[in-house]
Image (spheres, grey):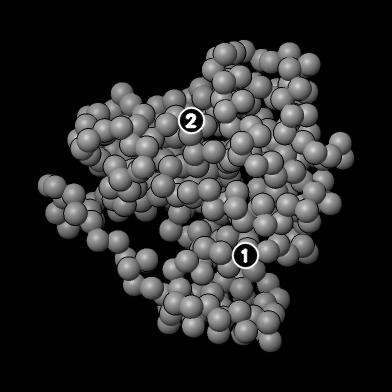
Amino acid sequence: MQLAIHLGAHCTDEDRLLRSLLQNKSRLAALGVAIPGPGRYRETIVKAAQKLKGKKAESAAQNALIEDMLDDDSTERLVLSFEDFICVSGRVFEQGMLYEKAGYKPMWFRNLFSEHQVEFFMSVRNPATFIPALAAHPRQTHKSIPAMLQGTDVNDIRWSDVAVAITESNPGCSLTIWANEDTPYLWPEIMREVTGHDETITLKGGLNIAGQIMHREGLRRMKAYMTSHPPQTEYHRRRVLTAFLDKYAIEDEVEQELDVPGWTSQVVDKITATYDEDLAELEHLAGVTFLSP
């Protein structure tokens, strides 16, 4: 069995991946890919992982966990998604580090299914927008950004450190990463990578993310254009999407106003420049597949 585990991060997904894949549940099931609803596994496997704390589950326990999530014995790939797999939103900056638990929590889940092939998936986000978004997270427990950061230096936040922690503690498990800012352009590819389906298969929902940041008229025109001029390659599809987003994007959806006490434009620019360097580092990390438009 192949298990694709989507780790979040917080404030990059809001279960949009799961919802898009559930739109295609029957079609994916016919391809041997299972997309169970969140109620069938999130609480169960989190509790199982906390109980074992990294110890490998016995074969019978592994099989029982998988069987509880499946409706079909012919399933070859199982997709699981939960932004709290590594930690809850209030512990993202625990001990002054970004996802300090990344060095062992993904391994806990991998060892729940150690006899199977486990792959990890994760989206990252510019800390300049990630931090205020996380502070406004509906399950955030801290009352202020300084309290949430727990001493973390905003100029020293590196997603590449998180990626290295995951890959080093999970040898043999692939890690696929993409930038949240690129998600509208990459959405069909992200769904394909997570589900492992063939490139010739087109799933519903490929424009779900673009549709959230585009005026309705623009989305209608783009769909009509793609119907009359079907993109022949992924590159062509992205060019079409870029052209329509340039013209019809909803400004408030693509430009975020930041109002963080003490953050000047120079602070934001420095954080963003560091993030750009970090993305370049992620592209070349061993064991990481970086999706880029």
- Helix, strand or loop at mark 2: loop
Crowd around label 2: few <14 · some 14–19 · many ≥20 (10 Å): many
Q: Is residue 227 above or below residue 211?
A: below
Query: Is residue 198 visible to the viewer in this orientation of the structure?
Result: yes
Q: Nearer the viewer, residue 192 or 292?
A: 192
Mark drawn on residue 22: none
The picture places residue 254, in percent across and down from the top left corner, at 37, 66
Crowd around label 1: few <14 · some 14–19 · many ≥20 (10 Å): many
Q: Please name the residue shown 59% across and 13% down the image.
A: 52
Q: Is residue 190 above or below residue 110?
A: below
Image check: 54 left or right of 132? right
Q: Please name the residue shown 82% across and 46% down the image.
A: 32
**Residue flagged by tag 1: what amino acid is it?**
Gly
Image check: 27 left or right of 190? right
- Residues marked 2 and 1 touching at CB (< 8 Å): no
Q: Is the N terminus in the top left, top right, bottom left or bottom right quadrant?
A: top right
In which quarter of the view is residue 66 placed? top right
Please tell me which of labels 2 and 1 falls first in the chain: 2
The picture places residue 42, in percent across and down from the top left corner, at 58, 32
Mark drawn on residue 206: 1
Q: CA distance from mark 2 to mark 1?
A: 27 Å
Image check: 238 left or right of 192? left
Q: Please name the residue shown 28% across and 38% down the image.
A: 156
How many numbered badges does the structure rendering display?
A: 2
The picture places residue 181, in percent across and down from the top left corner, at 43, 58
- Helix, strand or loop at mark 1: loop
Mark drawn on residue 86: 2
Residue farthest to the right? 74
Q: Nearer the viewer, residue 182 or 11?
A: 11
**Residue flagged by tag 2: what amino acid is it?**
Ile
Q: Please name the residue shown 84% across and 39% down the image.
A: 72
Q: Is residue 65 above or below residue 155?
A: above
